[in-house]
Image: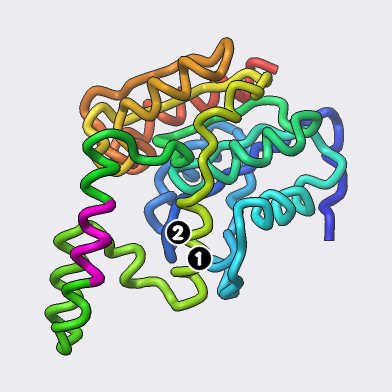
């Protein structure tokens, strides 16, 4: 059911986490935002933190988010996969997104060497899986190819992950017109900084802030710095 429109002119800030099954890593940032009087809604995402197990596409997640937004205009703050959902929603419903905050966002497919490595790992995983019978060895191999999210997912969520990874937003994001803040850890190896630079180049008027000592999750390691950025965006309306 769609949520009622915001009251008294307060802009709703919706936070979308990445590919995770727990929320504790967000506690410090959420407490910092609350201490500053910044109201926010931390969304539990289907298939991950809300207990359900759908097979969804990126369009399905955008439709789910539209039900939550209702008739409001909102600020979306998305990390990693949550950023991918936020981007898709901003493209589908530009009338409802006032501002975007993207933290180490997914949505740009691997390119160049990263793409070759991913494809090689996929082939190796298929070959390796024919010969290895022991789950422990299969788990070791998956960790070696950085496929732990896939390995730990249920069969349905593996299909969902495949659907999301296949969604290429790299060209479409040029249509995003709302003010956009892009926050990135300089040492991110999950969604590398080159992805953030590409988003910044293609989203007109966007602002890129690189956090020098951070990796994929600045909201964990650089709480006050991220809170400062979120507060600035929330107060800019």
**Magenta part of the chain:** 119-126
- Quarter in which the N terminus is drawn: bottom right
The numbered disc on residue 23 is: 2
Q: Is residue 20 above or below residue 126?
A: above
Q: Would you call the spot at circle 2 few (<14 residues within 10 Å), some (14-19), or many (20 or more)? A: some
Which SS class for mark 1? loop
Q: Is residue 190 left or right of residue 76?
A: left
Q: Is residue 83 left or right of residue 1?
A: left
The numbered disc on residue 165 is: none
Q: Is residue 8 left or right of residue 174?
A: right
Q: Is residue 130 left or right of residue 11?
A: left
- Label 1: which residue? 48
Residue at figure coordinates x 46%, y 18% from the top left: 200
Residue at figure coordinates x 37%, y 26% from the top left: 225
Residue at figure coordinates x 55%, y 19% from the top left: 203
- Quarter in which the C terminus is drawn: top right
Query: Residue 124 magenta-drawn?
Result: yes
């Amino acid at each position: 059911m769609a949520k009622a429109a915001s009251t008294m002119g307060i802009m709703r800030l919706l936070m979308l986490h990445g590919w995770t099954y727990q929320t504790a890593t967000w506690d410090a940032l959420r407490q910092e935002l609350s201490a500053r009087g910044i109201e926010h809604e931390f969304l539990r995402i289907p298939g991950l933190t809300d207990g359900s197990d759908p097979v969804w596409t990126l369009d399905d997640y955008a439709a789910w988010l539209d039900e939550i937004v209702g008739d409001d205009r909102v600020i979306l703050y998305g990390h990693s996969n949550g950023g991918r959902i936020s981007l898709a929603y901003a493209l589908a419903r530009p009338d409802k997104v006032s501002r975007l905050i993207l933290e180490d966002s997914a949505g740009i497919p691997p390119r160049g060497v990263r793409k070759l490595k991913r494809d090689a790992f996929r082939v190796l995983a298929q070959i390796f899986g024919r010969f290895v019978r022991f789950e422990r060895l299969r788990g070791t191999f998956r960790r070696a190819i950085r496929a732990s999210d896939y390995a730990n997912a249920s069969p349905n969520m593996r299909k969902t992950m495949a659907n999301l990874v296949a969604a290429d937003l790299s060209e479409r994001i040029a249509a995003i017109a709302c003010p956009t803040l892009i926050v990135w850890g300089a040492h991110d190896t999950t969604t590398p900084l080159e992805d953030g630079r590409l988003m910044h180049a293609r989203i007109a008027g966007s602002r890129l802030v690189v956090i020098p000592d951070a990796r994929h999750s600045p909201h964990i390691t650089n709480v006050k710095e991220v809170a400062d950025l979120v507060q600035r965006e929330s107060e800019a309306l």
